[in-house]
Image (spheres, rainbow, N blue to C red):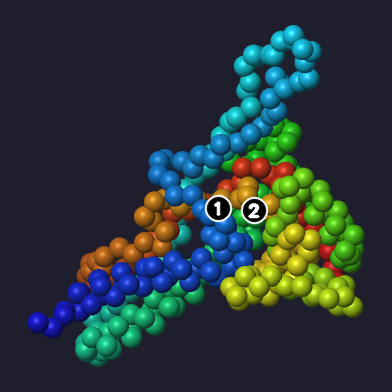
Amino acid sequence: MALTYSDITATTLKHYEKKLTDNIFKAYPLVERLVYKNQVKFQSGEKIFIPLEYGTNSTVAFIAKNGTISTDPQLIITAAEDSWRILAGTVLFNDLDNVLNRGEAQIVDLMKSKVTNLEKSMKKKLAEQLHTAQSGDAINGIPDLVSTSSTLHGIAVADFSGWIAGYANNTSEPLSTIDMATAYNSVGDGAEQVDLILASQTLYEKYESLVAPQLRFTDSRTADAKFTNLRYGAAVCVLDKDCASDRMYFFVTDYLWLCFVTDRQFHTFPAVQAANQLNDVVKVVCYLNLMTSNRRRLGMLDGRTA
């Protein structure tokens, strides 16, 4: 028996759901890096919770041969918490379009073009917000995470002095390798080295010109993911065209998390007929937020020029 339009819609959109997720995950250097390093959390519950260290254990000390070890209770762990944010879009199929595109192959082509358009639109919206301070119903942006003054994940800087970026410098001057070295070394600590640098096109090309007389090493895995990149120390420096033109970010990505509600990362709902219209509407949603468990391992150069 021939498949009906509704059957084709349901089965085909389920096929595109995983493809939509994969394509969006691979579209941005930060998201791709977090997915690669398994810095992705799938949770449920009213809020997102991430354990957070905010102090050192004061029982640690050198003691004499018959000395005593402190057993004082230690208040060193709290939790960063934040709200789920919803990225959503719809795909609309009009009955006349469906009639004019008769046949399984033609309907699939029609759906493919509309889902591809939705994918591009969701990519654009996510890219914009990753580099924009949080407002309204949007997710946290990188500027929120590297702030030295704002409240983040329910924790105010005034209540926890360590809850600021490891380095933030907004001096207006041409980018130099000394600038990069200071940011790189300030954000990293011992074995916890910066592993990802995001740069605007302006600053990426400036850095490229600074190292042009030398051998330029790229990261093959990042290049395979189709991102333009250079190495800097233990980090890969990646061109991110959505980055503000005067900014360069430094991350120890072990402390960055992309959090999703389980089974709701770019989830496709069944088509629903719109009331009083000859349209079927498909909703695609993603419940997510960008989180950090240690702002001191994040940093930024701002105000830099070529």
Could you tell me which residue is drawn at 56 percent across and 36 percent down? 51
- Is residue 186 or residue 282 the one in the foreground? 186
Where is 36 relative to 166, above or below?
Answer: below
**What residue is at 42 percent from the left and 59 percent from the top?**
265
| Mark 2–mark 1 distance (CA, rounded to whole Å) | 8 Å
Q: Residues within 10 Å of mark 1 (few under 14, many from 20)?
A: some
Q: Is residue 31 left or right of residue 202?
A: left
Q: In terms of image quadrants, where is residue 232? A: bottom right
**Res. 139 visible in picture:** no
SS for dot 1: loop
- Is there CB contact under 8 Å for labels 2 and 1? yes
* Quarter of the figure with residue 8: bottom left
Report the residue marked by disc 1: 39
What x and y, as percent, mark residue 295?
69, 44
Q: Position of residue 250 (x, y in %)?
A: 73, 56
Left or right: 47 with respect to 172?
Answer: left
Q: Look at mark 2 in the image and give the residue it sits on.
A: 253
